[in-house]
Image (spheres, rainbow, N blue to C red):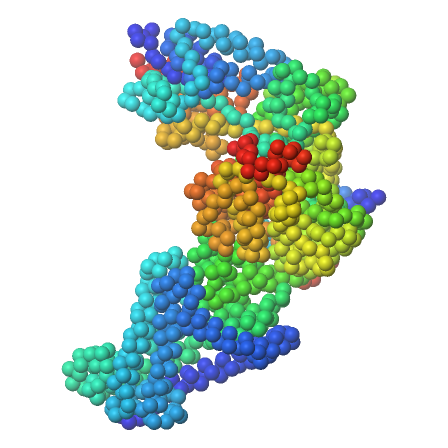
Amino acid sequence: MNGKYFIIPFLAGMAYLFLILIVRGIRWISGLSKIDKLRLFQSLKSGRTLKSLKEAFVEGLLHRKIFLKNPVLGYMHMSLAFGWFLLIVMGHVEAMVAEGSLSVPFYMPIFFRYFKTTEDFPLARFFSFMMDLLLLFVLSGVGLAMLKRFKKSLFGMKRTTRLKLFDRIALTSLWLIFPLRLLAESIAAAISHNGSFLTSGIGKILSSSQHIELLNTPAWLAYSLVLGFFFIALPNSRYMHIPAEILFIFLRNSGIRLKKQNTTYTDVQVFSCSRCGICLDNCQLSTAGIRDTQSVYLLKNIRNKDLDDEHLFNCLLCGKCQIDCPVGIETIDLRITQRIESTRQYNSSYEYLEINSSPSAKVVYFAGCMTHLTPGIITAMQKIFETAGENYWFFDQEKAPCCGRPLMLAGQYEAASKLIENNSRQILASGAQTLVVSCPICYKVFKEDYHLFNMEVLMHFEYIRRLIDREILQVARSPQRLLYHDPCELGRGMGMYKEPREVLAMTGTLVSIRNEKEKAYCCGGSLGNLKIKQEERDMIRNQAVNDYLEHSPDMLVTSCPMCKKTFARNTRIPVLDISEIITRNMLSPGIPGLTESKECILEEEYI
Amino acid sequence: MKDLDFLTSTPSRQIDYEKFDTRLLDSVLENETSFLTCMSCGGCTATCSAGNLTNFNVRKIGLMLRRGEIDQLSVEIEKCMFCGKCTLVCPRDINIRNVVLLIKKGIALLKTENILS
Amino acid sequence: MMNKPRHIAVIGGGIAGMETASRLAQAGYKITLIEKERITGGHLTQWSHLFPDSSDPAIVVSRLSSALSHQNIKVITSTEITDISKNGQYFNLKSGSEMSLNADAIVVTSGFHLFDASRKEEYGYGLFDNVLTSADLELMMKNEKPIRTASGKKPRRIAIIHCVGSRDAKAGNTYCSKVCCITGIKQAIELNKRLPECEIFCFYMDLRLYGSSFDGLYLTAQQKHKVQFIRGRLSEAAEKPDKSLQIKAEDTLSGRPLRMDVDMIILLVGMEPGISHNNFSRNGSVQLDENGFLKCKDVHAARNLTTQTGIFMAGTCICPMSVSETLENARSAALEVINYFERKM
């Protein structure tokens, strides 16, 4: 009964786990690009390490983001991760105090009650109480986890992820670890007649059994076995996210980003996914009955190397999953990178592109392909330019290449760069200082991927705002209730929530709703999704329209021709672009009566 | 005349149904059938941003696919800019962007299989 | 005849309602005709010429109007039926809280409404000065206004666009409105008569000329009026600084994109189910078909019967129809109603 061989499974598991983690860690870090390695090295030297440590603690253990999103789920994750962490820390302190030494064998605190049967060290009762309390804390999390598996609706979750073999082993082991530890410690407490509120209580019940001593080693062996199983299963299970996330935080905080091609940074992110399923609940594709292409599945497919185009390209790239991801995985960049890899073989070279001469102008206006199908926006912009007396060049009035963003969304980065190069040359040749665009899809690519030197790129409402501030344009206030729909590319894509609203507030009353800004709906029209059917797009759009109608706005306003076109197909709510709202409420210059009374209310001719 | 190019690249005088190469068509049909509903209105070709700049006809992409004219198709498909205007005007709601993606992918596969001349 | 004449409510005072009402009145039934507008006559009061004979629709309307002065007919205008319910033997019809009446049977003749062309934003209706609908043109001709651009100039080239709001999933209507093709040809001829110097182009997808004399009109348009036909759907229009328009289509027969500058665009707007259909179908007794028109009990044997016994229908609330078809259909509805009551006795 004195043999401590029962700890072998634990030791073996631990050794295996560390070996795998070290191998993977080395592989991941060495697979980064040279510049990224340098970034990591630099950040380790600087104070950012502390920041990363703090983040690893707050997100990896406390699970702050999950807490904010869903408190019950957050508690579950926290009690398991943070509770276990505290058990280990407190266990080590206890063992050190008991042994009177700072160096105790690392396995000692894990099986402390087996090795130490007497309470003859300082604060023994206190430690005993604390360890019971922490164990109870962890057990509450285990209980919730079991409940979640069988009744996910209790957690406000509609769906959760499916499990694979190693996940099942790891999950079962994890669930068993703490009940078995409780059992082993209770038996030890029963034999030694000690233990705190939890272990002594259960111990007393168990001590009625006659051969309680015989059960001691088997119980500890079982505990050691499930620990061993868990550690061995971990690298091939979802729980790999625990160590991966810590590395991910360090890499991310050192400024490493995905740059249009896969590196091991992709792997780190893929393995950091805990498959919590939060991205499933928020994904609007679910509304349309598409349930196997969401980010959590994408990551799983990348991991299992079984990603196909039908899944890869069936995503709106709206970015809602990224906003909510508690781990902070760059789901959009990851997917686009996969698309780049998937389509690398067939990028077009567009040899037919020609460089035409550009007229000189102060402002270049690029309407974009989509805006040409919403001439209301073009007409409004032309009116604004003319009222402002702007020396502008309407670059794509007759013909011009596409901005390149739709190609990028499809992963055709090299092909897009051909269009970008051609457009850049022509735009720069005009000598203009400002480029105005009326489409967020164009705006994003112009801001992020064009090299236009000193030329500024403005969304049309930014330009309008400037004209109003300089009193070149004057707009009247109308009592209209305007509900602003955030386009994905502009809102979550570029972080522009405030600017369009400020312009709209100058002319109407903004209706604020819960699902706006970061939480805004996608209209369903997205160019990011190449696979979705029209009926499915309609369902996504109608979900948004139904919510908007609840707030009975007079008008839905957006700043994207694609969103406008998509919403216009549902005739239940009138929709206009922000530029059209402005021109409708614009006061003509030179009419003294009108320009003086800015507050005058115009008749609505358009309800 | 640049626009006469299409005459010289026409593979044969008549459409010979018996000589169709359906490999590409079959692979596209597996995942996207909507292009079969085309009624040849030409809205896509009229609005096409690439067609504005070069001799490119989106409507004919579907036709070439259905007639098995892979050689010509592989040249033409390169011109598409993926802007999505065609999909937005199509009165039959054909998912044209996906058709183009599938054709490009299919042709790339055929090329790697070294079957295409 | 019966001792107590049966009472029939006819909903909609367009030509279908007028014809049904007068035929049933002649057969001895008491009729209440309810029209939501100020006057009866429906869309035809706004129309200038009828195909295929270019006749004046006012003749049709005035003949029907005089028939309405029958002693058995009561006409209520400016009243829209908002609710229908079955109450034992009879139907109860309500117009808000203002009016309520009972009837032994109902004939729905609520007609169509014209597709709102501004929903096709890329065509620029309501946005560009010189984009008109076929209805705008008819009204212009009816009021004997000269055909001029917004700035008062004689148009030198006009494009007539077929299938606006019809056969278009993007507009939500996948069906064909049937009468627009021939209307376009008729309007092209009328335009040529008024503007002999003006070039007229019809942009079509398929010319669906189903009537026996319609192809003759097509031939006349080509031979005598030099109307040109281009097979291609308009993708978009843009306004130029001089307010003329640049249009884009594919000339699908030559297989190349086509651009054209025109002074005026006429959009041949299709027929959509009347908006008031929702009032009848709300309680589920009268069903709609896949296009939103009233569903008939049997497409071959019972074209004028709705899915609710006792509620009949006639005219363009069933599907798009020409004037002559509508009138025929109205007479057949009257016959169905008479049969219904005779079987009941």
Q: Measuring from the top left, give residue B39's x and y in whole percent.
A: 62, 38
Residue A488 visible (yes or no): no
Q: Is residue C80 shown above or below B55? A: above
Residue A14 figure quarter: bottom left
Residue A585 figure quarter: top right
Q: Is residue C291 left or right of residue C158?
A: left
Q: Is residue C2 left or right of residue C48?
A: left
**Which of these two is toward me, A6 or A80?**
A80
Q: Is residue C225 shown above or below B26? A: above
Q: Is residue A426 left or right of residue A371?
A: right
Q: Is residue A77 left or right of residue A533?
A: left
> Which residue appears at 32% of the width and 24% of the height?
C86
Residue A448 visible (yes or no): yes
Q: Quadrant of the N terminus of chain A?
A: bottom left
> Which residue appears at 31% of the width and 93% of the height?
A3
**Which of these two is toward me, A486 or C318?**
A486
> Which residue appears at 37% of the width and 10% of the height?
C29
Q: Measuring from the top left, give residue B60's x and y in whole percent.
A: 69, 44
Q: Is residue A126 shown above or below C50? A: below
Q: Count the marks: how many? A: 0
Q: Is residue C173 shown above or below C33? A: below
